[in-house]
Image: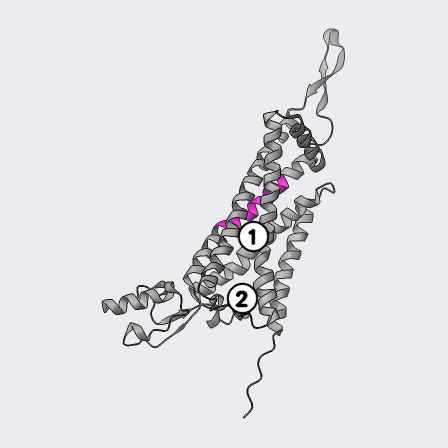
Amino acid sequence: MTSPTPPPIISPTTILSLLSTLLLLLAAYAISLRHLPHPNTPTKYRILYIWHLFDALTHFLLEGSYLYNCFFTYTLLPLPSSPRAVTSDYPHPASLGGARGKESQGGGDGRGFFLGYRDRLYGSNYGTNAFARLWQEYAKADKRWGGADATVISLELLTVLLAGPVAAYICVLIGRVWNGRAGGAGVRGVLVRRDGGGGSRGMVKGKDSSGEERKRRTETAEAKLWFLATVLATAELYGGFMTFAPEWLSGSPNLNTSNWMYLWVYLFFFNTLWVWFPLWVLYEAYMNIRVAFAAASGTGCADREMAVSKRKKVS
């Protein structure tokens, strides 16, 4: 008797899943060209914009679809006579605690089971929509994403509902900063016509109040930008750690590292994107905050010269 042929590592679903991620990146790049049209926009800030928009789209569309399947996609199970017979999705304490606790108490009201239903298994594994298929593919590398893992769902609720909007707002702030600087380039003073004595007219130099207001709004937007970018980058790093630390501490029972696709593409590449870019954002935030403090304090000639040089380079 011959053993069944294992499914191919690279399947049509694999290709479509990778293309969906590439499509989000291309969309973020195209939108950046429209939102940051000025040719003098620094490459660093364009990359910053593309990263945060890609981040927001990923949270809203991909991870949002994961939450949808966790809450609304399920399969029914025959209700067992005792809580011991209930099959939990995964052997995590969050999943098994309710079954063990209720058994010891002799109860069976559903507390401790996801959404309180003892006769349902939730998650993308039980769906047929396109996003469910995508998460079924990723679950081949990390099976928690195929079901309803309480820890992952808790992190993703914060990611979709908070991190996604913050990332999108950071893109808005980047647009305000650099479009404001582009619009404010040029002579700050303007010539204002007024009537002179004896009916003659002269030209005097006046203050461009609109330019000063634009500068103030730009500086406020830049301060918000680096504050929120720091908060978001820190949250992304913390979320990644809390996603994988429970696996590492328990011997990684849900991670499949049996082939290069699952290990290096699904697990390593896609997840470390949310390590390298947040670390880079934190570095850039530190450099900008350092320059701002040096310029504001007015102490230290070297620091002031560095601050002026830095501002000239990014302006």
- Give the residue displayed 72% in from the left and 7% down from the top: 197
Q: Which residue is mark 1?
A: 56
- The tag earlier along the polypeptide, 1 or 2, is 1
Point out residue 69 in the picture as x, y percentages from the top left corner.
47, 65
Q: Amino acid at mark 2?
A: Phe
Secondary structure that dominates the magenta span: helix
Point out residue 109 in the picture as x, y percentages from the top left corner.
27, 66
Q: Which residue is mark 2?
A: 131
Q: Is residue 28 visible?
A: yes
Q: Could you tell whether 145 is left or right of 49 in the image?
A: left
Q: Is residue 8 magenta?
A: no
Q: Amino acid at mark 1?
A: Ala
Separation of disc 1 and disc 2 at Cα? 17 Å
- Give the residue displayed 65% in from the left and 36% down from the top: 180
Which residues lie in the magenta part? Answer: 162-176
Point out residue 160 in the picture as x, y percentages from the top left corner.
49, 54
Can you tell which quarter of the image residue 266 is in? Answer: bottom right
Q: Residue furthest top?
A: 198
